[in-house]
Amino acid sequence: MRILVTGSRDWTDDKAIAEALLETRSPHPQRITVVHGGARGTDLLAHYWATKWGWITEAHPAGPDPKARNQRMVDLGADVCLAFATRWASDTGHCARAARRAGIHTVDYGVSTRMEDRS
C-alpha cells in the first residue's frame, strides 16, 4: 500500500497525522510505503511515525519547482492521499487536487483542498 502525504510546513498536530496513517493502513504493515516531500512539518511528522512503525518511507524533496515535484509524486501512484492543509491556495492544495485528478482517493485534514471549496 502506498500512502501519499502532503501538508503544510507549519502543521504541528502529529497526533492527527498518526491517527490518519493508522486509519489508512493495510493489514500488511511491512508493505506500507509513506510517500512525502521531505519538508519540515507534515512531511517529517509522517516520516517519523512511519519509521517508528517500521514502514517504508519515500521522500521527494522539492527542487526549484514544488508543483513539478508534487506531480511526480502523484504520477508514481498511491492508494490514498492524506492532505494536511492550512490554506486552500498552497502547494498542499495543488498536490491534493493533482491526486484527485489522477483518481487517487484524497482525504482532507484541516482546510479543504477541493476545487469546489475554493475561497
Image: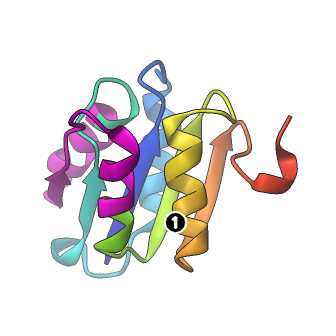
View extreme (front): residue: 64
In this picture, residue 67 sits left or right of residue 54: right
Residue 65 locus on image (x, y percent): 31, 39
Q: What element does badge 1 sit on? A: helix
For label 1, count other residues whose C-alpha is less than 10 Å away and answer few (under 14), some (14-19) or many (20+): many
In this picture, residue 30 sits left or right of residue 116: left
Residue 40 locus on image (x, y percent): 29, 24
Residue 68 position (above or below residue 3): above
The residue positioned 44% from the left and 46% from the top of the image is: 6
Residue 95 locus on image (x, y percent): 49, 52
The quarter of the rendered structure image containing the C terminus is: top right
Residue 116 found in image quarter: bottom right
Residue 43 position (above or below residue 72): above
Residue 109 found in image quarter: top right
The quarter of the rendered structure image containing the N terminus is: bottom left
Q: Which is more toward the observer, 100 or 50? A: 100
Task: Based on the picture, tell me whether residue 37 belongs to the magenta stretch.
Answer: no
The residue positioned 40% from the left and 51% from the top of the image is: 5
Q: Which residue is mark 1?
A: 99
Range drawn in magenta:
44-72
Disc 1 residue type? Answer: Ala
Residue 78 locus on image (x, y percent): 38, 74
Task: Based on the picture, tell me whether residue 69 belongs to the magenta stretch.
Answer: yes
The residue positioned 31% from the left and 61% from the top of the image is: 73
In this picture, residue 68 sits left or right of residue 17: left
